[in-house]
Image (spheres, grey):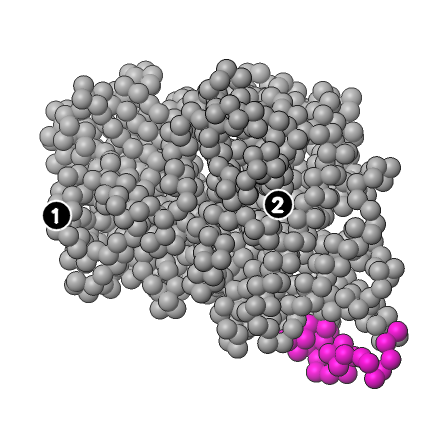
Amino acid sequence: MGNSCAGKGLQEINAPTTLPKMTRKQVLSHNKPDDCWCVIDNIVYDLSQYWKVHPGGGDYIKKWAGKDATLAFREFNHSPFAEVQLTTLGAEVGYIDENSTDFNEEYYKETPLPKNSTDIEEFSQQGDMMCFQCQQTSNGTGCTDMGVCGKSPEISALQDLIIQYLKGLAQYLEKADDKDIDDETFELFIFTFFMTLTNVNFNSDKHFYYLKKLAEARDKFQALYLKKTPKEEQDPRLSGTGQKNDPQNPASFIFKENDKKYIFEQAKKVGINARKVNLNPDLLGLLEMCVYGLKGGCAYLYHAEGVRNNAKDKKIYSQEERISVFKGLVKITADLTKVNPSMEELIQLNMDVGKNNFTVMEFLDNAHNIVFGKPTPSNVNRAPVEGKCILISGHDMMVLKKLLEQTKDQGINIYTHGEMLPAFGYPELRKYPHLVGNFGTAWFNQTNEFPDFPGAILLNSNCLIQPQPSYAKRLFTTHVVGWDDIKHIENDDFSELIQCAKKQPGFKKNSRQFKKYENVESEQTGFGHQTMAEILVPEIKAGNLTEIYLVGGCDNLDPTRSKYLQQILDLPQTAIVLTLGCAKFRLFGHKEKMGYLPGGNKVPRLIDVGQCNDSYSAVKVALALTQVLGVGVNELPLHLVLSWVEQKAVVILLTLLHLGIKNINIGPNLPAYLTPNLVNFLVQNFSLSPMSLPKQTATLSALQSTGDYKMSRETELFNKISDFVPVKFVEKKEVAKNTYSMKFAFMDQKTVFQLQPGQHVIFRAKSSEQKWVSRAYTPITKIGEQGQFEIIVKVYQEGLFSNFLKNMKKDQLVEVQGPCGTTILQSDERKKVKLISEKNNYEDLKSLNLISGGTSCVSMFQMVQFAIQKQLDLNINLIVANSTENLKVLEKEFQELALSGRGKIQISYITSDKEGRISQKIFQEKLIQKNDDPKVVNLIAGPHNFRMSAKNILQEMEYSEENLVQFY
C-alpha cells in the first residue's frame, strides 16, 4: 500500500470514532473517483465521505492526521487502471490541492458514514481473486486484489461463476436437437461469454441478472434432456441426482437468487485459485486459453448476429450455418467439463476454437460487406467540425448505422472513436453527411480524450475504462457494455443520447477543444481484402514490393509498445506495413515519412486494413497471394506481429494456428497462463516467436516492438536491444526515505555502458512462485563508463520487484536487458541538439523544460549529464516536485551538474509542505517561458496524475501541446 507512517495516534488527534478502518484489500476494492484514505500507524482509515463534500481539503486532512501521515486519493483519470499506491501527501499523489479551503469541521460531527459493500468486503478479505486473462494483468502474473482493468473482486468472482454456468448450460445444449435451440438461448450464450471480456461490463446487477438467466436456461434444457432420454441412458452427471455444486460438474450448480453469500461461495469453488490446487499447470493453461478463445469468438459472433438480425432481407449466412457454428461453440464449452483431460485433447480443443472462429470471422466479414458495402479506400477527417456532436466508440457497426439513422436531420454530427474509425471504409455508412470524422485515438486514451469532447458519448462494445466525473453524466453504454451508475440504452433507442447531445455545447470554432484538435491530420482506411489483393500483386510482380509487415491486434497504454515505430520508419522503401486494430494509432501521423512504394503507382507504404476482426482480411490476402505467386502461405514475404491485450487477440491467434500459419510474433509479453512447457510447444510446433522468450531470436528483427523483444546475442550489450543477461549486485546505500542507490557489475568488466540519454533498462527475476517479474529503471551512470552501472530504487511496501532488489545480497545475480525507451536526447558533430520522442522529433533544440514528480527525476539525470558532457548550446530548466524534504533524490548531484553548465542549467527542487503543489505560479517562476523561446519543449515525467496536472497547467499557460512530451 505504499509507505507506512509515524502519524499521531488516533486518540491524540481526537479522530471521529465513526471513521471506518479498512484493510488493504478493502481499499483496493473501492473504485470510486472520490475515494480518499489516510494511513496512521499502519491502519488505513476511510476519508471518502469527507473528501466528497470538500474535494480540496488537503490542508484539513493534514492538520487532522498529522503532517507525517500517509494519504492517498484515487482519481481514475488514467488508463489502464493500476493499484493506487499510497504515497505521502503532495505531488506524487495527484489532484490534492494544498492551497484549497479547509474541510467543514462540523461535518465530522453530523454526517454518518455509510457502510461499505459487505459483498465485496467478504469476498476480498478471503483473498480469492485471481484473474490473468489479459496482457495488462498485474506484474505479468495475475490480478489478486483489484483488476488492472478496474475489475473488482466481486465482478471477477461473478464472471468466474458465469463461465461455470455457461459450461453447465453447454452440457445440456450439446444433447439438444437443433430445433430446440431458440434465438433467446443463442443470444444469451454468446452475450454472457462476451460480457466477461476485458473492459466490457463492470455492472454487478447485470452479472447477477445473467447468472439467473443462465440458470433458467440450463433448467429448461435439463428438463428437455430428462424428458427425451430414457432413465437408463441418462448421463449420471446430467441426471440431477448427484452431488450439488460439484466444481467438476457445472451442470450440478444450483442458483439461489437472493443469497449473495451463497453465490460468492459458489464462485470461490470455481476460481483459478481453487482449480489450480488439483490441476496440472499445463492443463490449467490450456483450459484457460480455450475459455478466453471462446470469449473472443463469441464477441465476433455477437457482432455478426447484430448485423444479420437487422438485415434479414439480405442473405448473409444461412440458419443451418448459424446453428452449426453455435453447436461448435457449445461442444467446445461442454468438452471443458471433461474430468482428467489429456494434454493432446486440450490442444485439439484450442485448435477447434480457432477452426470455429474462422467461420465466425467469415460471417462477420460477409455481414459487413453485404450490408454496408465492400470497403474502399477513403480519407477520414480527424479534425473537429462546428456543431452539436455524438462520439461513438467500440466495434459495433450496426449500432453506428442505427445511430446515423436516428440522428438524420437532427443537426448533430457523429464522430467515431477507436476501432469505429474503419466505418469510413464502408460506402453505406460514409454516405451519411453527418458522419463527419474520427475524434481521438485508441481506447486506452479515452480518459484523456473524452473530457475534451463537447458532446454525448456512446460505448457499444469493449473497451470501457472507469468514467471520470468530467464526462460520466454524458456517457452512455449499450448492448453488452455496462458500468454502475452510467446510463444504459436498451433496444437501440438513442433518444436520450440525442437529447443529451443537444444540451452540450458542441464544437465551437474558438473553443479550446476545437483549437486543440483542428490541425490533426486526416488518415486513410477502407483497404479490405478485395482491394488489397488487387493492389499488392502487381507491385510484387514488378519488384516494387518485397516485404509485407502486418502489425495488428490490440493495444494499450504500455509505452514499450511504441518501440517498433522507429524500426518501421526505417524499413526499406520496398516494404509495406498493414495495420489493423487499435495498434494503427501508434503509426498515424507518419504517412508522409513512410511515403509510397517505388514504381510511380502511388501505393502508400502504410495502409490500414480495419478493425481487429479484419484479421480475416489479412488471411484472405495471404491466401490470395499464395495462389497468384504459387507458394505456400509460410513462404510468403508476409511477417505477422500480433499485439495482444484481451481475448479477441487470443482467438485470432488460435485461428491463425488452426490455418497452419507460422512465424507469428506475439507480445509484448506472454500470457500469464502459458507455462514454459506450453511456450516450448508453440515455438516448436508453430514457430511462434514470443516477444519475451529468453534467447529467442524474433522473426521480425526489423519490428522489435518492446523491451521484451529479443535479437541475437551478437548485438552489443546496451547499444542495441539485447537478450536478458546476468549482472551482479555490488552495493547499495540509502539516499532518501525508502529509496536506495544500487550498483551492479557486468560479468565482463570490459562492457561499456552505451545507453543514450533518456533510455532505460529492464530488470527481471523469478518470484517465489517461479514466475518472471520485471521492472524498468533508468541508470544514472555516466555514459561511456565501463564495467558497472547505478540505478535509484524506490521501495514500495507491496512492490514485488523493488523489495527483491532491496534484499539482494552482494554478488547475487539478476537479469537485465536494454536499452529501451523512445525518448532520446542526441547531438551531431556540430552540436545541434535533437530530441526524439514517440510522436515527434524536435530538431535544432535550444530550450528544454524538464518537469518531474518524485523519483522520476532519475530519468532526466542522464539528459542533463549529457548536455554538460557535450557542452551543448541547450538551456535546461528542471523542476523536481516532492512531497516532503526527506523524499528528495539526486539534488546534490543535479546542483553539481548545474555548476558545470555555464549558466545554462537551472535546477529547482520544490516540496508540497513548503512551496505547495505545482502551479502556474511555480511554472512561471522556474521554467523557460514560451515568450523566451516559442519552440521550447516541455518534457514531463512522473506518476500519471502528476503528468496530467502538469500538462493541464502548461495548456492553461498556452504552451504548444505539440511541444509537450510525456516521459514514462
Binning the other alpha carbons within 10 Å of mark 1 as few (below 14), some (14 to 19) or many (20 upward) gives: few
In terms of sequence position, does the residue under pointer 2 or pointer 1 come before the other?
A: 2
Q: Is residue 960 visible?
A: yes
Residue 33 drawn above or below residue 130: above
Give the distance between the C-alpha atoms of the residues marked 2 and 1, in whole angstroms: 51 Å
Quadrant hosting residue 835: top left
* 916 to the left or right of 473: left
Q: Give the range drawn in magenta.
A: 228-254
Magenta stretch containing residue 571, yes or no?
A: no
Q: Mark 2 points at which residue?
A: 462
Counting from the top left corner in percent of width and height, residue 927 is at 28, 26
Q: What amino acid does circle 2 point to?
A: Asn
Counting from the top left corner in percent of width and height, residue 280 is at 50, 73
Question: Which residue corresponds to the image point at 16% horizontal and 63% vertical from the top-left?
Answer: 810
Q: Can residue 68 be seen in this view?
A: no
Q: What amino acid does circle 1 point to?
A: Lys
Q: Quadrant of the C terminus?
A: top left
Q: Name the residue under label 1.
A: 750
Q: What element carries label 2?
A: loop
* 322 to the left or right of 288: right
Question: Which residue corresponds to the image point at 41% horizontal and 41% vertical from the top-left?
Answer: 700
| Residue farthest along the front direction in this orientation | 630
Magenta stretch containing residue 242, yes or no?
A: yes
CB of mark 2 within 8 Å of CB of mark 1? no
Residue 669 drawn above or below residue 903: below
Depth-wise, is mark 2 or mark 1 nearer the camera?
A: 1
Given residues 333 and 152, the one toward you in this image is: 333
Binning the other alpha carbons within 10 Å of mark 2 as few (below 14), some (14 to 19) or many (20 upward) gives: many
Question: Which residue corresponds to the image point at 30% horizontal and 17% vertical from the top-left?
Answer: 933
